[in-house]
Image (cartoon, coloured by chain):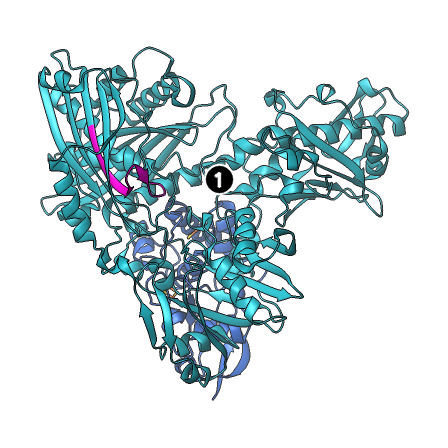
Chain colours: A blue, B cyan
């Protein structure tokens, strides 16, 4: 079945079974591998993408349910790494293995888009479902704060153009 | 330099430029020592001044792909901006050992890479002096240039690289690696390699690797360890959408190589996994089906009541010393099997063409994988090429190469077609090589002055007779051996077929918790301050024990004293329900002491407010930011092990299947603050992946006791009703 959506600002259409999870459409049909497979069960957040600006677990999302929606993945956040969060992540040297970080960034981006200056507790709540096996939480939290400051003080982009 | 010897080789880069590489002359490795050295190994200096360094060891988040090239760049004296780091393929003739485990990557490479870098720099200086027409002694280097300060003349490495490559190799004693005080790169947090790729979602991980025409595989193994696939509804499976192949793999009887199972191959991975939902297999489950965790626990209880089977160590008269003690403690500890649960599930790509195999693997031991694939498939190691890919976490799981052998086997059935095997999280968790559980019956006594006079450990673990299964043993030299004069460790083993293996800080991750919890029990029994009690135990001798057992008590004391000072131990007034605990441990050449501040409420909800860590891993912290990241991560990892991680066995199979049953710490549970200090001692730098983990378990458990009076003797603590606040 043909399913059309807007992916990172561009229209795309895929011919796949309706129940194929968005994660596998992205990774194997569209060859966009930034979105990661961690658990396949909504347990870890590694597969987080945005649907109309809201973070969702792509591993549990049948592709048919995003027909006509706007989907943003890590590749669409800013391919050049210009998003305030990406800058902050590099500045704070957040990742270890890095495998969870696309999901962390996408969840954090959705948070900052609606709350430009979150508290520690707000960050912790927003990112509660994003596990990091390497334990980089302390840095993630600091980097989200830094990104919030960057967005206020410079013209680093926080919103992404694709949503 | 020290007495280690190195073989280096320099040659001309085709198209101009210089190549230099080297390896250590291993006493036990005549094959390596005689091998012709391919100089592509480490450093390429191109005529345009770009320097390509090879990250030779597997990268799994420990930062080695940045740290090792930094050592080279430092000695070469180059601009980090002009450095490109590429991941080397497996070639242990070229590179020497390429495994990553036991926190050995740094200590194994420190001297070698400094020698390679310094040799290249010396040759560049010689070539530069000739080209500038000035005396060699008057030249220096800076940012990839040879300078003649007196005349103000200079020349870039790129311009003279070809000339340098033609010079005779300097004698090892002419080469002087830099003095630490002149370091410009080591000790600075250079931008981590792959960081921009990570934050923009570039396909840099093993799971992302694809080739044109690739097919994708799932592999269903017998849920009972070591069981065999007898038959399956393969005809039905082959008719499922986009499925291309389905077959039974007999296996070779070794679950660490090729466990028996059923492979399903499809055009895309999801189709293979969908088809798997319809798979019906008849298994021959084998004898392991009678094993259960409940059975192991019952057996341990029985064994504790009996005499130990064999002695590990016996110093003095333990029984008399304990009987004569003023205060005695008798306590039984137990800890579970746990899974590695690294974030990226097992996967591997392979292609078999004309009798030759190529694999793209996320392995911590690519060399061992090559050997195992060769014997499993009946190939020569030389016919197997192993490419190393960045992996989403290792923690010891990728010391095993089962995913590589499975992928290789599947590829061999479909010659000419590249295949990619990917496990589900459930496969990964149910077929791990688990950190083995264990049981320790501890008895000890202190005298009137508060000194430990007797110590006995009945160590009940897993194995056959006197042979421990992987990573379950205790050593005669384990602390506090040599520090307590009447000291006994005896063991009894329970046979098991549960696959076990090293998990980050193997053995230490459970032993440190038991030993330092028990020391804490003794300190409280003696009415002593837990830090002072430990300082007294460490004593005044700098090094205790000989040979393999040598324990630098001086280094540990320094860590303990500093962590007590930084944490304000004994100096701060704590709220009711809040307590501080301490632990220390030596492992993988690193010394770490930690203090945790924790509160516990009436519902046994635990909050870790802060952890202080002090470590001594030698004279240099190569990349401070990444070093601190490792320590923070190890502390959070240890918290997960303490609270909620447990693998249980029922009917010979793993009960837990996904993260919800084997929970890791979440952001809101992590300590708001982790303070890390390093003591730079006069020792060669050693690794950091493992030694910061073990002390955090007892530090938190001891803080829980200080806060609540409850002694944690069973892990995970959730079993005793604890949870994170
Ligand atoms: S892969 Fe989707 S939540 Fe883990
Ligand atoms: S950085 Fe490794 S899982 Fe988060």
B451 up-or-down from B671: above or below: above
Q: Per the image, is B466 magenta?
A: yes
B485 up-or-down from B703: above or below: above
Position in image of residue B401 (x %, y %):
48, 53
Position in image of residue B548 (x %, y %):
41, 23
Q: Is residue B337 left or right of residue B47?
A: left
Residue at left offset 35%, top offset 41% = B471
Q: Which residues are magenta?
A: B457-471
Mark 1 lies on a secondary structure that is helix
Q: In the image shown, does B67 or A74 lie closer to the viewer?
A: B67
Magenta stretch: dominant secondary structure = strand
Judging from the image, mark 1 belongs to the subunit labelled B
Q: In the image shown, does B51 or B458 lie closer to the viewer?
A: B458
Indicate which quadrant contains ligand 1: bottom left
Q: Which residue is mark 1?
A: B626
Q: Is residue B558 left or right of residue B212?
A: left
Q: Is residue B392 left or right of residue B526?
A: right
B688 up-or-down from B201: above or below: above
Position in image of residue B174 (x %, y %):
74, 19
Location of residue B111 by image quarter: top right
Q: Is mark 1 within 8 Å of ligand 2?
A: no
Residue at left offset 14%, top offset 37% = B304
């Amino acid at each position: 079945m043909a399913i059309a959506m807007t992916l990172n600002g561009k229209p795309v259409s895929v011919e796949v079974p309706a129940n194929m999870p968005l994660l596998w459409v992205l990774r194997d049909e569209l060859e966009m591998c930034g979105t990661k497979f961690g658990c396949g069960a909504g347990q870890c957040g590694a597969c987080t993408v945005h649907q109309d600006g809201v973070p969702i677990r792509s591993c549990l999302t049948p592709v048919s349910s995003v027909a006509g929606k706007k989907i943003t993945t890590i590749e669409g956040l800013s391919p050049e790494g210009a998003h305030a969060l990406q800058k902050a992540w590099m500045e704070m040297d957040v990742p270890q293995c890095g495998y969870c970080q696309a999901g962390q960034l996408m969840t954090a981006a959705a948070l900052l888009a609606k709350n430009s200056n979150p508290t520690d507790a707000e960050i912790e709540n927003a990112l509660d479902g994003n596990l990091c096996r390497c334990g980089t939480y302390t840095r993630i939290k600091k980097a989200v704060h830094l990104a919030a400051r960057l967005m206020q003080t410079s013209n680093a982009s926080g919103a992404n153009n694709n949503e | 330099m020290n007495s280690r010897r190195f073989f280096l080789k320099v040659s001309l880069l085709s198209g101009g430029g210089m190549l230099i590489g080297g390896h250590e002359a291993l006493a036990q490795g005549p094959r390596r020592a005689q091998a012709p050295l391919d100089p592509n190994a480490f450093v390429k200096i191109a005529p345009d001044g770009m320097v390509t360094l090879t990250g030779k060891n597997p990268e799994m988040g420990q930062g080695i792909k940045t740290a090792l090239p930094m050592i080279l760049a430092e000695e070469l004296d180059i601009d980090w901006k002009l450095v490109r780091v590429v991941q080397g393929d497996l070639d242990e003739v070229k590179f020497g050992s390429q495994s990553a485990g036991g926190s050995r990557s740094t200590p194994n490479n420190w001297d070698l890479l400094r020698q390679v870098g310094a040799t290249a720099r010396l040759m560049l200086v010689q070539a530069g002096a000739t080209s500038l027409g000035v005396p060699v002694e008057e030249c220096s280097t800076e940012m990839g240039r040879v300078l003649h300060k007196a005349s103000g003349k200079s020349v870039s490495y790129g311009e003279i690289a070809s000339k340098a490559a033609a010079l005779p190799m300097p004698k090892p004693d002419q080469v002087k690696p830099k003095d630490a005080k002149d370091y410009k790169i080591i000790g600075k947090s250079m931008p981590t390699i792959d960081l921009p790729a990570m934050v923009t979602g570039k396909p840099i991980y093993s799971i992302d690797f694809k080739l044109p025409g690739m097919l994708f595989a799932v592999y269903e193994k017998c849920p009972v360890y070591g069981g065999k696939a007898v038959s399956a509804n393969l005809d039905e499976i082959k008719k499922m959408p986009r499925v291309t192949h389905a077959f039974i793999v007999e296996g070779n009887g070794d679950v660490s190589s090729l466990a028996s199972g059923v492979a399903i191959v499809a055009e895309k991975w999801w189709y293979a996994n969908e088809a798997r939902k319809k798979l019906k297999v008849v298994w021959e489950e084998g004898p392991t089906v009678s094993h259960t965790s409940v059975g192991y626990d019952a057996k341990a209880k029985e064994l504790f009541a009996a005499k130990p089977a064999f002695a590990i160590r016996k110093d003095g008269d333990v029984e008399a010393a304990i009987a004569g003690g003023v205060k005695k403690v008798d306590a039984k500890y137990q800890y579970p099997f746990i899974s590695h649960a690294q974030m990226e599930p097992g996967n591997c790509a392979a292609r078999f063409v004309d009798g030759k195999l190529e694999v793209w693997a996320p392995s911590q031991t690519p060399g061992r994988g090559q050997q195992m694939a060769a014997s499993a498939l009946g190939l020569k190691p030389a016919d197997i090429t192993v490419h190393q890919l960045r992996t989403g976490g290792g923690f010891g799981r990728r010391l095993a190469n089962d995913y590589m052998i499975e992928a290789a086997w599947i590829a061999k059935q479909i010659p000419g077609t590249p295949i990619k095997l990917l496990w589900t999280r459930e496969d990964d968790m149910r077929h791990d090589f688990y950190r083995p559980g264990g049981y320790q019956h501890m008895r000890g006594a202190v005298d009137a002055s508060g000194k430990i006079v007797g110590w006995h450990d009945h160590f009940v673990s897993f194995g056959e007779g006197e042979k421990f299964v992987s990573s379950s043993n205790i050593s005669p030299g384990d602390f506090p051996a040599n520090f307590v004069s009447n000291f006994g460790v005896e063991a009894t083993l329970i046979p098991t077929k549960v696959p076990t293996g090293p998990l980050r800080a193997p053995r230490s991750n459970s032993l440190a918790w038991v030993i330092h919890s028990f020391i804490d029990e003794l300190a409280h029994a003696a009415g002593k301050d837990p830090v002072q009690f430990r300082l007294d135990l460490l004593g005044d001798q700098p090094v205790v024990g000989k040979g393999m057992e040598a324990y630098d008590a001086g280094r540990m004391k320094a860590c303990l004293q500093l962590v007590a000072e930084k944490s304000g131990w004994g100096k701060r007034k704590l709220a009711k329900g809040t307590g501080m605990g301490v632990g220390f441990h030596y492992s993988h050449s690193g010394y770490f002491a930690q203090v945790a501040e924790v509160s516990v409420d009436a519902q046994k909800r635990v909050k870790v407010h802060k952890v202080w860590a002090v470590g001594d891993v030698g004279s240099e912290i190569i990349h401070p930011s990444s070093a601190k990241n490792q320590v923070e991560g190890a502390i959070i990892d240890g918290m997960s092990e303490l609270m909620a991680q447990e693998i249980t066995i029922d009917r010979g199979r793993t009960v837990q299947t996904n993260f919800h049953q084997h929970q890791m710490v979440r952001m809101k549970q992590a300590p708001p603050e982790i303070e890390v200090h390093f003591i730079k001692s006069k020792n060669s730098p050693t690794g950091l992946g493992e030694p910061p983990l073990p002390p955090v378990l007892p530090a938190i458990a001891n803080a829980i006791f200080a806060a609540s009076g409850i002694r944690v003797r069973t892990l995970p603590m959730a079993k005793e009703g604890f949870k994170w606040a």
